[in-house]
Amino acid sequence: MKKAIFLCGLTAILLALTACNFGSGTSVRMSRNIELKTEQDSFSYVIGRDIAGSLRMLMPEINKDILFSALYEGLDTTKQSRFDEMVERAIMMNVMMRLNEQARAKAEAEGENNKTKGAEFLAVNAQRPEVNTTGSGLQYEVIEAGDVASRKPTAASTVEVRYVGTLIDGTEFDRSRDDQTVRFPVGGVIPGWTEGLQLMNVGSKFRFFIPSALAYGERPLPGIGPNSTLIFEVELVNIID
């Protein structure tokens, strides 16, 4: 909590110094062409950007006029806070708890929406003749058969692949870089991949349609909302062992 209060306070200082003149009450602007001449200058800039990004999450809760006034008071060593430390902590705790609850409710609503859309997508997708559905609910489509005489990986294998990952609306969230391969253990990835890779021969290219229960479930990740159904186009380049 002390760290959170410190970060908010430091962010306020940065914002205030760049957006307000406390002595006259006249707004000022920092030039966009600021010169970063020293390592300290660069560090100051990076810290400012980073903390400002954190503060943006709280902006709906912040009255800027009061914030800047409190900053001015805080910089004046002759003035005391209107609250003691325990009250300050309680205020911060109450607001953070409410914001966390709002975020949780929003994530739950998003998750339910994603689950419904995913189920509808998979139901329609399963009707396509080129799509196969396994007992777990994984759907896959063979794009290229590859070397049908080659062995298939097991859950204990390590493989090299190229891949592209998208959401059901076509939004790409991940891919192997350029034309490079990615190496990983078959048993160390999401269940949909672990199962799907064991269906592939070397040189084959499949498209996996992975229900959220076989992907990341309710856990959101960057670019992937909770309960998202995922699509991966995967090329099995090699089996290492």
Image (cartoon, helix red, strand yellow):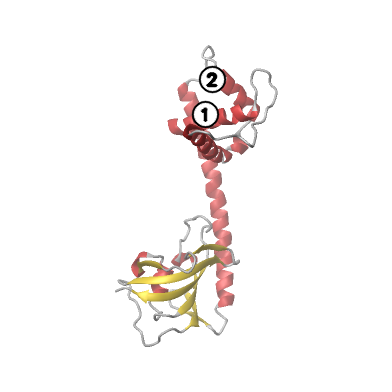
Type of residue at label 2? Gly
The N terminus - image quarter: top left
Up-down: is 239 above or below 62?
below
Q: Position of residue 164 (x, y in %)?
A: 51, 68
Which class describes the residues within 10 Å of circle 1: few (<14), some (14-19), or many (20+)? some
Instruction: Residue 172: give its label.
Output: none
Tags 2 and 1 in contact by the CB under 8 Å rule?
yes
Residue in the picture at 58% in, 60% down: 113
Q: Position of residue 7 (x, y in %)?
A: 49, 33
Tally of marks: 2
Locate residue 73 relative to residue 184 in the image: left or right. right
Type of residue at label 1? Gly
In the orientation shown, which residue stands out farthest toward the right? 26
How much space separates mark 2 and mark 1, taking CA atoms?
A: 10 Å
Up-down: is 125 above or below 228?
below
**Residue assigned mark 1:** 9
Q: Position of residue 117 (x, y in %)?
A: 59, 66
Locate residue 58 relative to residue 180 in the image: left or right. right
Residue in the picture at 68% in, 21% down: 25
Residue in the picture at 56% in, 37% down: 52
Task: Say whether disc 2 or disc 1 marks the residue closer to the N-terminus.
Answer: 1
**Residue assigned mark 2:** 74
Observer-nearest of 151 and 167 = 151
Which class describes the residues within 10 Å of circle 2: few (<14), some (14-19), or many (20+)? some
Q: Position of residue 160 (x, y in %)?
A: 38, 71
Give SS at disc 1.
helix
In the orientation shown, which residue stands out farthest toward the front? 37
Residue 75 in sight here:
yes
The C terminus - image quarter: bottom left
Place residue 49 in its image quadrant. top right
